[in-house]
Amino acid sequence: MSRDANGHAESLEAARARLVKRLRGRQSEIEEVIFAQARSVPDPVGGGDAEYLAGLRATVMAVVDYGLTGIEQGEEWTAPIPLVAVAQAHRAARNGVGLETVLLRYAAGHRHLGGFVMAEADQFPSHALRYVLDVQGLLLERLMAAISAEYKCEVGRVGRSLEQRRGERVQRLLAGEPVDQAQFDYEFDDAWHLGMIAIGARAREAVRGLAAGSDLQLLPVSRGEKTMWAWLGGESRLLLADADLLPTMGATDVLLAVGEPGRGIQGWRLTHHQAQAALLVALHRPQGITRYVEDMLLAAALQNETLARSLEEIYLLPLASQRDGGTAWRATLRAYFDARRNAATAAHTIKRDRHTVERRLQSIEKRLGRLLHTCEAELNVALRLHELGVVACAGDPSLTQRAER
């Protein structure tokens, strides 16, 4: 029997529960630290594959929650590892990320979570902390064993198929490495290209039909059971409408991220990287087609944590000081920008009179300390990040508390 911070008798179980409660209060911070560490471990995919990166973040979040639950439940707890962690292990195996790299990330996450536990040392007796660290070690062993087994199983299932070797060559070509282009039935240097990424149960079928009935070339690359990379190539500049994509993709419930037309091998690479950036938006906001040209600023913010948090601090935090957490002000701004800065149209959209909208806009400018027309692009991206749930929500107490300081 130990004692809590007030000197009251406390069981080991109660001490664990109290520790986990304190850690869950910092869970977002823990996840960000571990995710940053995971990204710092070099691998052949890195930050260039939006789906892989999103899977890595989801895995960090799920495994941190798994670890905290395990600490609270104790050494007898035997729940299966998170399914997203299994899926990410499979994804790593298919993408050529080594098992050593995968396990290094788990070891780094374990180390950093242990650091957060030890930061609470002055609040808990030493024997309780030792127990928690022992449980953490057991959880790590269980995770690494299960992840290793899943990874090896996926490697055995996929094998060194012709399709996998083709995907590896494409990845090397994207990285700028020398590859014999004659291995592909596709013209790179003297053609225009439109890159895209399709995700869904029928992604393969949808991609195979993209060039049907046209004189366009198609370079499809499988990235798993539900993910396809693809390029359409032709002699003239390709537009989305040229490929007749809207009816094709809309009928198959496939998520499609599309870059912009690019010429030659550099254009071939660029249009794919644009599709990867568009995919970041699509994964947060599923819809039929997401085009990079329509969401490039939002995509940039999703790729850059500093930019996203800066937009939150500069443009959303000041609005959150309102009693409703800034809900009315954000709705007014969104309607105003959607109406191309027409206050009367915005008023009709939010069912308020024009004078109310104008007063709100003046109050917002005063609160931000800048005129709206000087920061419309930044505000638009900040509002859209909020709508995607990437930055703090209106009802988030931490956002409101920070705004009132």
Image (cartoon, grey):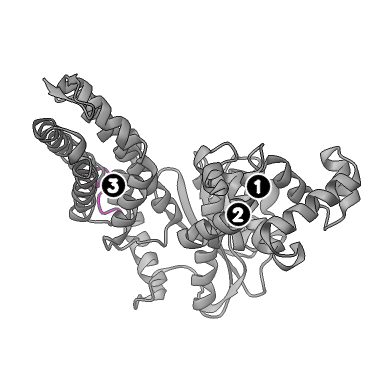
> What is the secondary structure assignment of the residue under circle 2?
loop
Query: In this picture, is 269 found above or below 105?
Result: below
| Amino acid type of the residue tagged 2 in the rendering | Leu
Spot occupied by residue 93 in the image (x, y as percentages of width and height): 27, 50
The mark found on residue 280 in the picture is none
Which region is colored magenta?
155-161
Q: How many numbered marks appear?
A: 3
Horizontal side, residue 348 vs residue 64: left or right: right
| Amino acid type of the residue tagged 1 in the rendering | Thr
Which numbered disc, 2 or 1, marks the residue that appears first in the sequence?
2
Viewer can see residue 205: no
Q: Which residue is mark 3?
A: 158
Residue at 51% from the left image edge and 41% from the top image edge: 200
Cα distance between the residues tagged 2 and 1: 7 Å
Which numbered disc, 3 or 1, marks the residue that appears first in the sequence?
3
Q: Which residue is mark 1?
A: 248
Q: Which residue is mark 2?
A: 210
* Residue 160 is covered by the magenta coloring: yes
